[in-house]
Amino acid sequence: MIRYVARRIASLIVSLAVASLVIFVVIEVAPGDPAAYMLGMNAQPDTVAALRAELGLDVSRPERYLNWVGGMLQGDFGTSYTYRTPVAGMIADRMWVSLPLAIYALILSTLIAFPAGIYAAVRRGRAGDVAVMGATQLGVAVPNFWFAMILVLIFAINLGWFSAGGFAGWDKGFWAAMRSLTLPAIALALPQAAILARVMRSSLLDMLGEDFIRTARAKGLSARQTLWRHALRNAMIPVLTILGLQFAFLLAGSIIIEQVFYLPGLGRLVFQAISSRDLIVVESVVMLLVFAVIVVNFVVDMAYALVDPRLRSRR
């Protein structure tokens, strides 16, 4: 188990190093000078040069990369070109919206998908299975922003149960803040629940056809006992993979939903930073999101080892 964890930690470190280099190179080769963009088309060359020096853009790119990585290792993400405030503070403020939204949506997705997938697998070929698979097909096909607009139309405009947009803030109380995140979380969760339910059903059906399931039934276990004690646990490995990927997507890919509901999260921050060519903000937020993806995958690998003891014994 120790060797397994050590290999995964080494892989995590290498992945982060490669990701930081790729992110820096891709963003830095984008055309345009942030200083010239900020000062406008008619800015004098000496003024642009002075601003470049102030922003730290007058040094070589390798030095800027090392300064950026070294700062991140110390918790310093640099200073925003546009707002002239520390990027770390901007990210922390937005993270208190995006992270709870992603967790909320993941919980809703799991609560919907697991019962639906198990129900469909147990009733394979029957009306219940057909109904669940039809609903999941619709959930996969329809984009989440369409769900968002429908939810706003029904629950915000017609019924008035929720606000159509904005974030109440955690200072208004936990329930007020969660109420602001409910419709966005549902809009994010529905397509992900459809994907997860289909994976759950497919994986569980594969397990139910294995020889060890027939052996368990031959030993006298009921269908329910066989399902919960043997089939479901072994079917969880591909489901855990999808869960890990979904959390990363929900954290990093909610920019459209944040725009629809006007939420001050990381997605809107990246969108605004790209629009104003605030490269340091874009680099730092993207790196943070990549870090979250890699760490989630690491946690999923650890979960694999708990679910499947064979992984812990590999040399």
Image (cartoon, rainbow, N blue to C red):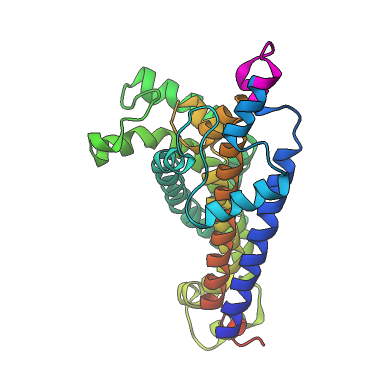
Classify residue 28 by image quadrant: top right
> Is residue 2 shown above or below 132?
below
* Residue 165 screen position, x and y as percent: 40, 24
Classify residue 33 by image quadrant: top right
Which segment did they paint magenta?
35-46
User: From where the camera sits, is residue 129 visible?
Assistant: no
User: From where the camera sits, is residue 289 visible?
Assistant: yes
Q: Nearer the viewer, residue 153 or 271?
A: 271
In the image, 97: left or right of 220?
A: left
* Residue 297 screen position, x and y as percent: 58, 62
> Is residue 130 shown above or below 304?
above
Q: Residue at x 52, y 71 (%)?
A: 303
Q: Nearer the viewer, residue 277 or 147?
A: 277
Q: Nearer the viewer, residue 290 or 74?
A: 74
> Residue lying furthest top in this view?
42
Q: Residue at x 23, y 34 (%)?
A: 172
